[in-house]
Image: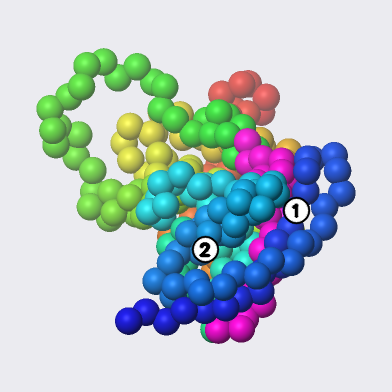
Amino acid sequence: MSKELNLTLQVWRQNGPDEAGHFETYRAEQISEDMSFLEMLDIINEQLVENGEVPIEFDHDCREGICGTCSLMINGQAHGHAKATTTCQLHMRKFQDGDTIVVEPFRARAFPVVRDLVVDRSSFDRIIEAGGYISVNTGAASDANLTPVPKEAADTSFDAAACIGCGACVAACPNSAAQLFTSAKLAHLNLIPQGQPQRFERTESMVETMESFFGSCTNHGECHEACPKEISLDFIAFMNRDYVKAKVKNRKLAGQT
């Protein structure tokens, strides 16, 4: 039989991006330890609706740990204290009966609050729009395995592609930097043959778009610790290397040197 918890929640409430926010205190009682964190918030919202109050706004979609939308700060940590876990996969058994839990939106200038626990992460979209795709016309689809890809490159590209773009790396970083997200999105394309024609153009464009929204990386490593997919810090080094190469190569192509 599952254990039941009685908890106190301090939840950030904010009516809109231009309004001041504040914490509201709620009681979460008889919460099953088998519930996910979002299911617990569902229970709170049902109670609020029954009482004629406005429910808490929070983002969610798949609830399977793969969409990246469940972006919450829980007791000051992005997605909570469980390692390699999204908020929707954080189960209440990770908490103790009688705990007080502070729930906030991600805190970063590039992620303005829309309402309550919902933030606008469209700055990530701007980075992808700057080059996070392959647009070179390669003709019709080729036969499988026609283009050999070294296993190490394929495996590393797959590791980078595991990034779900949740924004926990930005929320955890003292500088609100987006190097881990951007480097992952670059690596999963730059490591495969199909990504080579636009590799340096892509790198320069995405990095400079990133820098227009986010802070600078100073190697705290908090991004990796908060990442639910444990994206490696090595990708940041790969990105920095390619960015230096891109500045030289792209200037030569433009006839500037």
Q: Which residue is mark 1?
A: 13
Distance between mark 1 and mark 2 Cα atoms: 17 Å
Asked if the magenta segment contains residue 102, the reply would be: yes
> Where residue 91 appears, x then y in whole percent?
45, 70
Q: Amino acid at mark 1?
A: Arg
Residue 21 in view (yes/no): yes
Magenta segment: 97-122
Disc 2 crowd, CA 10 A, few/some/many (<14, 14-19, 20+): some
Residue for point 45% across, 64% down: 36
Residue 246 in view (yes/no): no
Q: Is residue 183 or residue 43 the one in the foreground?
A: 43
Residue for point 57% across, 73% down: 29
> Where residue 111 appears, x then y in whole percent?
70, 45
User: In this rendering, is residue 206 above or below 183?
Assistant: above
> Where residue 248 appears, x then y in whole percent?
60, 36
Q: Is residue 250 left or right of residue 35?
A: right
Residue for point 30% across, 19% down: 138
